[in-house]
Amino acid sequence: MDILINFFGSTAFAQFSLGNIIMLIIGGIFITLAITKHYEPLLLVPIGFGIIIGNIPSLPSMCVGIYDKGSVMNYLYFGVIKGIFPPLIFLGIGAMTDFSTMISNPRLVLLGAAAQAGIFLTLLGALVLGFTPAEAYSIGIIGGADGPTSIFLSSKLAPHLLGAIAIAAYSYMALVPVIQPPIMKLLTTKKERLIRMKPPRTVTQREKIFFPIIAFMVCAMIVPGSIPLVGMLLFGNLLKESFVTERLAQTARTALIDIVTIILGVTVGASTHAQTFLTNQSILIFGLGAFSFAIATSAGVLFAKFMNLFLKERDKINPLIGAAGVSAVPDSARVAQMVGQEYDPNNHLLMHAMAPNVSGVIGSAVVAGVLWSMFVK
């Protein structure tokens, strides 16, 4: 009996708490949404299973938990807390992204810039709620709907909030098809949703090659803190567009990004121990995240309407693509296409929406660099 009692004391059943059960349910919800609703399955399945992994209690002496120094999970988590994985994700995104529409119609970059308003308003809200400046800056980046950037900045400024910030950022990225359409419809008229934009001009291969080099140099010279993210994003794009490194580009946009996504998702999910995750701060972070995402979407749409006041009829912008200014690539661009085709099945907005979408990625990375630089002595 002593042997049996000692064995039971080493099992997870003997150490379970109500918080662990709640987190297991949340992990199950993530996996269910990914499988049944197809909400970012490549992210939610690893994160959801990671949440389950992180909330199976174990004895500290076993050294299997993600916060147990020397454990396998702890070593994998090293890439998160040191900001290694986000630049690798950006490398893959750059290798699969086409910047042609943005190059052909530079004014659409302004929509991506406008959507960053969500970051700054959320930052102010976090300060009002009592978060420190470093914590507020990390929370504000959720407004860009960019998971890797949120992880990167919080790993530098507020590592103790990394789990809550990462889960919030990725949750809202996955819920883009649910959150954005009502806001887009509320802020636009039927006439505006029916606007057909003229086709973008053809971009030469030379322009595609020069763009990542010049754009990186401009961003890096102005905001050196953006080098890790913007540098890898545009380097990946150069691999894609140069045509002489297709093998490297193929690896970056397939095997590399898939491997990093798996490890990042599982470890971020596993970092959500109930004892450290279920706090008032986490609840506030999720609330601020929802607020920031709504503000970012609204700012992009409203700025497109503002731009139309000064454009000729043939150059009008469909305000729906303003919502793509958030960094959820390419989901927010697809949502703009989906909502537009509800009113005109032959109106193809996807290629236009990709311009503010990719500029939003660059914009949020640059903003993260600016915020990070404020804390560098």
Image (cartoon, grey):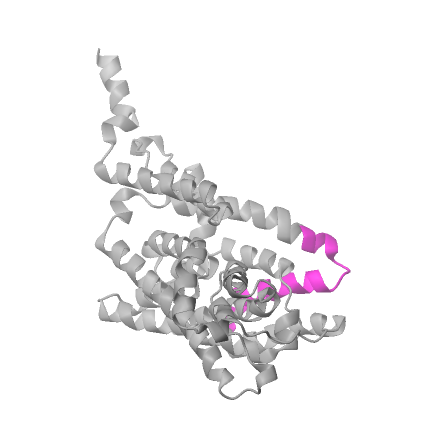
Question: Residue at position x 43%, y 68% from top?
Answer: 184
Q: Looking at the picture, tell me which residue is in the foreground, 352 or 136.
A: 352
Provide the major secondary structure of the magenta segment.
helix
How many numbered marks are there? 0
Is 296 situated left or right of 280 in this image? right
Question: Residue at position x 57%, y 87% from top?
Answer: 312
> In the image, which residues are magenta?
223-250
Q: Look at the image and tell me whether residue 234 can be seen.
A: yes
Figure quadrant of the N terminus: top left
Q: Look at the image and tell me whether residue 377 can be seen.
A: no
On the image, the x and y values in percent for residue 334 come to 54, 60
Q: Indicate the quadrant where residue 142 lies.
A: bottom left
- Asked if residue 228 is among those painted magenta in the image, a careful observer would answer yes
On the image, the x and y values in percent for residue 362 come to 53, 69
Task: Tell me: residue 66, above or below residue 253.
Answer: above
Figure quadrant of the C terminus: bottom left
Is 297 situated left or right of 108 in this image? left
Residue furthest toward the top? 1
Q: Looking at the picture, tell me which residue is in the foreground, 242 or 335.
A: 335
Q: Looking at the picture, tell me which residue is in the foreground, 190 or 362.
A: 190
Question: Residue at position x 24%, y 27% from top?
Answer: 14
On the image, the x and y values in percent for residue 182 come to 39, 63
- Asked if residue 363 is among those painted magenta in the image, a careful observer would answer no
Q: Indicate the quadrant where residue 232 lies.
A: bottom right
On the image, the x and y values in percent for residue 218 come to 58, 78
